[in-house]
Image (cartoon, grey):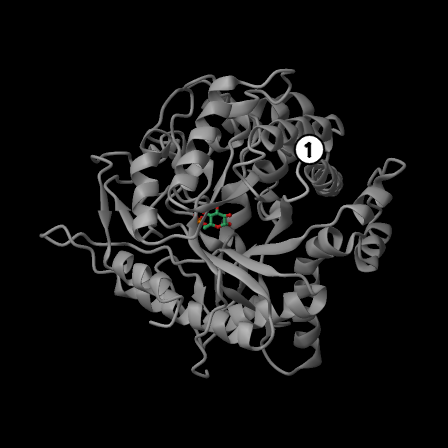
Amino acid sequence: ATDVKHFPEGFLWGGAIAANQAEGAWNVDGKGMSVADVASYRPHLDIKDYVSQWHVGPEDIEKAMATDDVTYYPKRRGIDFYHRYREDIAMLAEMGFKSFRLSIAWTRIFPNGIEEEPNEAGLAYYENVFRCLREHGIEPLVTLSHYEMPLYLVNHYDGWTSREVIGMFVRFAKVCFERYRDLVTYWLTFNEIDSVFRHAFTTVGVVEEKYADKHEAEQAIYQALHHQFVASSLVTKLARRINPDFRIGCMVTKTLNYPETCNPEDVYLAQRENRTNMFYTDVQVLGEYPRHVLNYWRRNDIHVRFEPGDEEILKAYTVDFITFSYYMSMVQSVHAEQREKVGGNLVTGVRNPYLETSDWGWQIDPEGLKIGMIDLYDRYHKPVWVVESGIGAYDTVNEDGSIDDDYRIDYFRRHFKAVAEAIDEGVECMGYLTWACIDIISASTSQMSKRYGFIYVDEDDLGNGTLERRRKKSFDWYRRVIETNGESL
Ligand code: BG6
């Protein structure tokens, strides 16, 4: 690696969280239940069973709806950001944050998704949060949908498979755009829109058991995804009308795949996976389905209903910038069956002997971040923004209360440098938001012990603890990075 460490002026340093993993307060002030409120604690998620263990079936939903337990449904309690946001945002400001990414829980605004009128308490809450950010000079980046759809829509509409859900989402977005017109400029429609096939329940509210077989379920997921694409474009159209200064981005999981060897078959496998990953940005940035996806549907007898005008909508309302999460890279091999596997973000691949892994077995690859950014920028020629990247680790609190998370500092130092190198290679990069700047409940396993923050939260997996916030060693390190715009790296 070279020694480039220059970041452009105005680079948006900061961090990110999602409502459902941080707020808690799952049933107060009129909030309805969302898919996150039925996500149970799964500390032993094994990469071999990623998909099946993450899976949520009708019986899981029923069981969850019958209880108000917050111990085994940890996202219901979060870290109580709902009541502590002022204190938390003040700490982010202390680190010098330029930007903070958070999501709006749809169910605080429309508890079941179907209401005609929004819930004022929910609207007022986010207004206060955004005002607080502004007072600290922090630019909000707001995700409209981060694994938080109303559970009601899952139970009564089969999630996003129903065309009506588009209208409900557009109504939700409209209310937010109008209310926060002068408080928020940067918006994202769907978090990791590419993750539909990894966890259909959480993303598009598809309960796979409801379908006759795997083929039917796959078709339903594609249909739901198509509706999200259309919704995203309609929301973009609306945003431009409500405030021409709004900037709308898409958000994908950047999964970079390397071939295990120079065997052309390995190379092709990796290319195929990378193309699949870029299918989603192809639609949202270029405005049309790539031919390989249409061919795949044809070959596999998958029928996705398009309404007249859908194609035009997708083409007309593409995004202004591309955001992505990045946690690791993957290796593809024609001999995958015989190889040791690693995983992360509910994706699995062959182990890469050149890389170390996190406490959770996710492969650490800063160079891959640079490669991924160059790939994205060269393909789309749109500004990119890293809006999630970080390391989930076990942190230890020393006797004096300090937390020496040198591994986190090392992780970010290498990743920040990789971004500087990508910028030097010509990539336009708007900023870097770390995941998660404060410890929150893990998305996949609902663990608290999988910590990502610069700020430690005194809470264990079962919800014991004072919720007190503490600055980790990385807190001061990041403050210095921001203060010097990366020159201190
Ligand atoms: C991303 C999600 O997939 O990965 C986040 O957008 C999530 O919500 C993050 O928290 C890390 O995953 P996990 O399972 O370690 O929390």
Give percent across and percent down for residue 227. Answer: 74, 37
Q: Quadrant of the C terminus?
A: bottom left
Picture layout, residue 357 above or below residue 217: below
Q: Which residue is mark 1?
A: 160
User: What is the secondary structure assignment of the residue under circle 1?
Assistant: helix
Look at label 1 and name its amino acid: Trp
- Residue 1 in the image: x percent, y percent? 46, 82
Q: Position of residue 147 (x, y in %)?
A: 54, 38
Query: 10 Å neighbourhood of mark 1: few (<14), some, or many (≥20)?
Result: many
Q: Is residue 190 visible?
A: no
Q: Nearer the viewer, residue 369 or 378?
A: 378
**Residue at x 36% of width, y 31% of height:** 72
Is residue 484 positioned above or below 123 on the image? Answer: below
Direction left: furthest residue: 400
The yes-or-no answer for disc 1 within 8 Å of ligand 1 is no
Query: Quick check: 476 above or below 26?
Result: below
Asked if residue 159 can be seen in this view, the reply is: yes
User: Relative to residue 469, is residue 448 drawn left or right?
Assistant: right
In the image, 230 versus 154, the foreground residue is 230
- In this view, the residue farthest toward the right is 308
Residue 51 at x, y = what percent?
55, 47
Look at the picture and state if 281 lies above or below 181.
below
Query: Which residue corresponds to the image point at 22% horizontal and 39% vertical from the top-left?
Result: 468
Q: Is residue 105 left or right of residue 438?
A: right
7 or 399, nearer to the observer: 7
Q: How many marks?
A: 1
Q: Residue placed at 70% from the left, 80% from the top?
A: 264
